[in-house]
Amino acid sequence: MTHSGQTSQGSERGTAPRVAGLLLAAGAGRRLGGLPKALLRHSGGLLVEHAARALREGGCGPVYVVLGAAGERVRETAALPGCVLLDNPDWAQGMGSSLRAGLAAVSAAGPAAEGAGGDTGGDGAGHGAEAVLVSLVDQPGIGADAVARVRAAYRSPATLAAAAYDGRRGHPVLLGSAHWTGVSHSARADAGARGYLRERQDALTLVECADLADPSDIDTPGDLHRLR
């Protein structure tokens, strides 16, 4: 659960803390027969559109979307207003490479940089963030409510927080800026930030979200019913 009696740096300044969204959407969907998950149909649109919208409507900005397999097709077909689109040439190495690419882009924005690379539709893209909220493209049951609840756990650049489902850690994950370098160094293959968070369990705030989100993911053809 989130801690109480604390104020974030943004609140002390009289403004909401800037929390960027980071959507990992580079996978090729090998277990789905080679159909990239970003291009799956969901709720009248594409799964990548749904996931990016959840981050935006949950209060994150700017939203960075890391693309890899079928990146050009996503750029051509997906409506992603206000998002910074990033290409990860190393996407085949696993989710860890996409997490590193995304954190590098958010870090490069700096506290008041103009432009962060990639495509942007505005919404303040290019300005620095105090934290980043990481979400996965293949979890259609996670929406803006869960994003907003985890985002609200931000207290300082040292914050580590994650959604929990009946006490079990899941996504989205909130990383204060003090952790970006460490997470980048530890992210490997498909583990993402898992090892980094496991080593820092005492500092990790779990935010229960089972009452408003479903963390089930889309990995195999047997999971496609979750998109209906």
Image: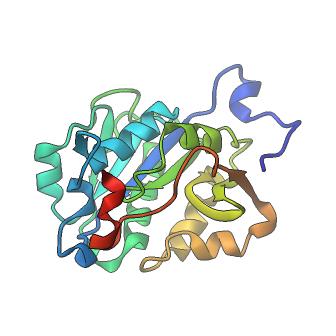
Q: Name the quadrant containing residue 129.
A: top right
At 18% from the left and 57% from the top, the residue drawn is 71
Foreground residue among 117 and 41: 41
At 56% from the left and 63% from the top, the residue drawn is 181
Foreground residue among 168 and 85: 168
Residue 179 in the image: state x and y as whole percent.
Answer: 63, 59
Relative side of 156 to 143, left or right = right
Q: Name the quadrant containing residue 124.
A: top left
Residue 165 in the image: state x and y as whole percent.
Answer: 64, 58
Relative side of 1 to 218, left or right = right
Q: Is residue 212 shown above or below 191?
A: above
Q: Is residue 59 shown above or below 136?
A: above
Residue 99 is at least partly visible in this image: yes
Foreground residue among 95 and 48: 48
Relative side of 43 to 7, left or right = left
Residue 85 is at least partly visible in this image: no
At 15% from the left and 61% from the top, the residue drawn is 70
At 23% from the left and 70% from the top, the residue drawn is 28
Residue 60 in the image: state x and y as whole percent.
Answer: 50, 36
Q: Farthest residue toward the top?
A: 14
Residue 83 in the image: state x and y as whole percent.
Answer: 32, 38
Coloring applied to the structure: rainbow
